[in-house]
Image: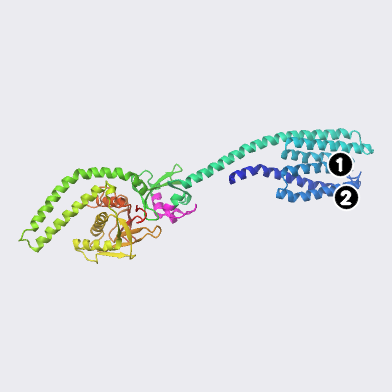
Amino acid sequence: MKLSDQLALSSSEDLAWRVLTLVNVFRLLVPLLLTIPFLTLTPSPVGQFRPALFIAVSTAYFLFALGSIPAIRHHRPTIEIQTFVGACVDVLAIALLTYSSGGMGSGLGAALVLPIAAASFIISQRIALLVAALATLALLLQQGMTTLIGRGDAGDFTAAGIAGAVIFLMTLSIGSMSRSLRESEERVRLREVDAANLAELNQFIVQHLRESILVVDENDSIRLINESASQLLKHRTVQPGTPLGEISPRLLYLLGTWRAYSYDWQMSSLSMVAADGGSIVQPHFVSLDRESKGPTLVFLEDMTLIAERVQQSKLAALGRLSASIAHEIRNPVGAMSHAAQLLAEAPSLTPQEKRLTAIITNNGERVSTIIDNVLQLSRRDTTRQERIELNGWMREFLMEFRQTSQIGTDILRFNPTLSDLEIRVDPTHLHQLMWNLCENALKYGRTTTNPGAVEIHTGRIAVSERPYLEVLDRGPGIASPDAERIFEPFFTANKGGTGLGLFIARELAQCNRAILAYEPRAGGGSVFRLVFADPTRWEA
C-alpha cells in the first residue's frame, strides 16, 4: 500500500484513539473529584452508605485508568477490545460508586452517559447497545439492592429507568451520527487518496517525460524541474529552490529577454548549449500569469534530437537545389580548370604565371569538392566516416592552409591539450568545415588595430568526455542579435558574404553527429566550438 493510502486510512483511527484518550482522562478525574468531597466534607455527599467499598472502588478505578495509558499510547490491544473492556469497567465502577453513595439519589448514575456515548462512537452499534443494556441493568440492580436494605426510595427506580433510557437514546443517536461521520470520512479519505495518487502520478509523469521542463518563479528560482531538464542544464540532479542563474546564466538571460519582449519573433531562434557541450537547446517560455512577470513554465527542446527528425526533409530540399545548379557550376569550373591546365603547359610561362595557374587549378578542384559535399548533405548514407587522430590531422591541415593562405605559425596557432585524441568523422567534411572556420577567423577575427593570432584548441569536454575542437580569435566578435542567426542560410552581417558558409559548416557537422556552436570569448572575440560524437558510440 502506498504511503498516501496508509495516511488516509489511519485518519479515522486517530480520531477514535483520541476519543478513547479523553474517556480515559474522564476515568482519572472521576475518582479524584469524588474522593475530595468524601474526605473533606462532613457529612459526605458521596460514599456515606458504604465508605470502605467507595474507597476500594475509587482506588481500583483510578489504577485501571493509569494502567490504560500505556495501552492507549501503544495502540495495543485493538481499540475495539480496549473500548469494550473499558466500558464494562465504567459500568461496574460507577454502579458500585452509586450503590455505596445511597443509590440514584446521589446523582452518580448519570456519570455513565459520557463513557457509554463515547463507546458508541468507537465500537459497532450492536456492541454499543449491549453495553447500554448492561449499564441500564447495573443501575436498576444497584437501586434494587439499595431499596432492599432500606436505604433507598422506591421513586429512585424511576430515575434509574430514565437514566437507562437516556443512555439508550444517546447510544442510538451517537451511533447513527458516527455512521454518517464515518461514511463522510470515508468519502473524504477516498478523495484524499485519489488526490494523493494523482499528485504522485503527475510527479512521476513530469519526472519521466522525455521533454525537459522546469518552472521558474517570479524571483528566478527553480520551483520544479524534471530529470531530463536537470541533465541538460547541469548534467546532474538540480534541487528545487536553486537560483536559475547558478544553474544556467544563459537561460536566465533568455528568460529576462522573453519577459521584456514576450512576442518578439526573434525569440524563435534563441538557443543555448547544453551542460555537456554536445547539444543545442532551444527554450520555450509559457507564462503562468497574465502579465508574464511571475512564474514561468520553460520547455527545453534538444535541437539535436529534433534535427535528427527533420534533417532528412531539409537535406532533401537542399539536395534538389544543389542538383539543379550543380551542372551549371561544374561546367564553368571544369572549363576554368581545363584552361588552366593547358595554360600551364605553355613553355614561355614565368614562375609567377605558373604559380597563378596552379592556384587556379587547386581552387577549381576545391570548388568541385565543395559541390560534391553540398550534394552529400542530402544523403547521409554517403558520409564516409573514419577513425582519425585529431591532433595529427590538424597539423597536416594547418600546414596546407598556411601554405595556401601565405601565413605563418604566429598568425594561426595550434594548441592541443591532449597528445592522443581520436575522433570518428568524414575527413573531407572536416576539411571543408575547418577551412571555412579558419578563413572566417582570419578575415573577420583580426583587424588592423588588433591583429591578434587565431588559435585552435583541442581537448575533451569535462562532463561528457566528448572530444572537441575550438577556433578562437580576438576580433570584434558578433553582435548579440546576429549571434542567434549566424547559422541560418543566407544570413550574413558582412558585405560580400553569401551567408552559406556557417550554415554548410553546421550541416556538415550534423552529418557526422557533431555539434558546431558559437559563443563570445571572454575578453573579446569569438569561439567556434566543434564537439564530436563519442567515437565508440556510433560505431556499428
Residue 395 quadrant: bottom left
Residue ID at (10%, 53%): 339
**Nearer to the camera, 19 or 276:** 276
Q: Amino acid at mark 2?
A: Leu
Q: Which residue is mark 1?
A: 98
Q: CA distance from mark 1 to mark 2?
A: 17 Å
**Nearer to the camera, 257 or 145:** 145
Q: Secondary structure at mark 2?
A: helix
**Coordinates of residue 523 in the picture (x, y in percent):** 33, 62
Write down the region rendered in magenta. Answer: 231-256
Q: Which residue is mark 2?
A: 39
Q: Is residue 395 above or below residue 491?
A: below
Q: Secondary structure at mark 1?
A: helix
Query: Which of the two marks, 1 or 2, is nearer to us in this view?
Result: 1
Other residues around mark 2 within 10 Å, as few (<14) / some (14–19) / many (≥20): few
Residue ID at (85%, 35%): 160
Q: Quadrant of the N terminus?
A: top right
Q: Is residue 45 left or right of residue 387?
A: right
The stretch drawn in magenta includes residue 289: no
